[in-house]
């Protein structure tokens, strides 16, 4: 009997890598095997110079139903040491996705619950079908969204997170858009074309500039204005202007040609 893969990974035209969760029968639930393999795959894509962007998608009716409860029940009955080690692996997955140097897009075609909301929150851009739903459902199981909470709060804000983490209410794609958890809501049949439009925009930018822009956002978020922050931003733009990519981009613009990283 052939085992069903946890996900499919492929690198397509323009260096766009796509990871598709492929266990629709269990609503693409997260377990320890998926955590380990997906972390490895993301690290590999991050270091692959061919890759310009990463799309995270899923097969079936659900994007991701969160944690596989059979896995959670099994680990709950183990030692505190084992529970801590297991939670650290999930934390590593979320941090790997969040810190990915390549632009990342979540394509949410269906419900995202618990850890599925975490995956969406860790991607740079999220596009949801109108029929998608979201839920931070952990308290209904007597649990909390511990590992994913920093990313969820960063994506949808503290006030909204307080409501939805406490009530575990499901909310619509349009509410997710209002809160900032997703950037666009589109009819299900336009999900792929919307993704393509965003990818086309991404592929026009300098790859290292995009990685540095993401790093810049992390560096300035939550910090007070002052001399230290000004000095850091000054140093960052000075380095980028002097970089080979920065010089190529400015020269290409002045010469009215495409920069070297645009392959079309």
Image: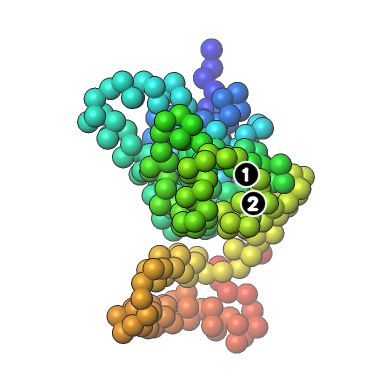
Q: Nearer the viewer, residue 6 or 221?
A: 221
Q: Is residue 175 above or below residue 27?
A: below
Q: Nearer the viewer, residue 156 or 28?
A: 156
Residue 236 drawn at (x, y percent)? 38, 77
Q: Indicate which disc residue 214 carries.
A: none
Q: Is residue 183 visible?
A: yes
Labels 2 & 1 near each other (Cβ < 8 A): yes
Q: Quadrant of residue 262?
A: bottom right
Residue 239 drawn at (x, y percent)? 37, 79
Quadrant, the C terminus: bottom right
Q: Secondary structure at mark 2?
A: helix
Q: Is residue 235 above or below residue 96?
A: below
Q: Is residue 190 above or below residue 79?
A: below
Q: Nearer the viewer, residue 10 or 219?
A: 219
Name which residue lies at 47% across and 78% down: 246
Sort mark 1 into few (<14), some (14-19) or many (20+) by Cα contacts within 10 Å: some
Q: Secondary structure at mark 1?
A: strand
Task: Give the residue number, with chain letter if any, for mark 1.
Answer: 171
Task: Give the residue number, with chain letter if any, for mark 2.
Answer: 175
Sort mark 2 into few (<14), some (14-19) or many (20+) by Cα contacts within 10 Å: some
Q: Quadrant of residue 189?
A: top right
Name which residue lies at 68% across and 51% down: 174
Residue 128 located left or right of residue 40:
right
Q: Nearer the viewer, residue 154 or 186?
A: 154
Q: Is residue 260 above or below residue 100?
A: below
């Amino acid at each position: 009997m052939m085992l069903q893969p946890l996900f499919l990974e492929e690198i397509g035209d323009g260096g766009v890598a796509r990871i598709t969760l492929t266990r629709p029968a269990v609503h693409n639930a997260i377990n320890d095997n998926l955590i380990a393999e997906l972390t490895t795959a993301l690290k590999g894509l991050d270091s692959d110079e061919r890759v310009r962007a990463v799309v995270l998608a899923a097969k079936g009716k659900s994007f991701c139903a969160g944690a596989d409860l059979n896995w959670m029940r099994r680990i709950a009955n183990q030692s505190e040491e084992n529970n801590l080690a297991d939670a650290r692996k999930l934390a590593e997955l979320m941090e790997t996705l969040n810190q990915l140097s390549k632009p990342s897009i979540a394509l949410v075609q269906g419900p995202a619950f618990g850890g599925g909301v975490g995956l969406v929150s860790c991607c740079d851009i999220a596009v949801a079908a109108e029929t998608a739903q979201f839920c931070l459902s952990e308290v209904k199981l007597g649990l909390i969204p511990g590992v994913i909470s920093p990313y969820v709060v960063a994506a949808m804000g503290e006030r909204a997170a307080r409501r939805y983490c406490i009530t575990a209410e499901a909310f619509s794609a349009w509410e997710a858009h209002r809160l900032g958890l997703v950037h666009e809501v589109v009819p299900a049949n336009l999900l792929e074309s919307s993704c393509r439009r965003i990818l086309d925009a991404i592929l026009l930018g300098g790859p290292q500039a995009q990685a540095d822009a993401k790093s810049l956002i992390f560096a300035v978020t939550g910090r007070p204005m002052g001399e230290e922050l000004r000095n850091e931003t000054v140093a960052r733009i000075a380095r980028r202007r002097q970089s080979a990519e920065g010089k190529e981009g400015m020269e290409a613009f002045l010469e009215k040609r495409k920069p070297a990283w645009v392959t079309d």
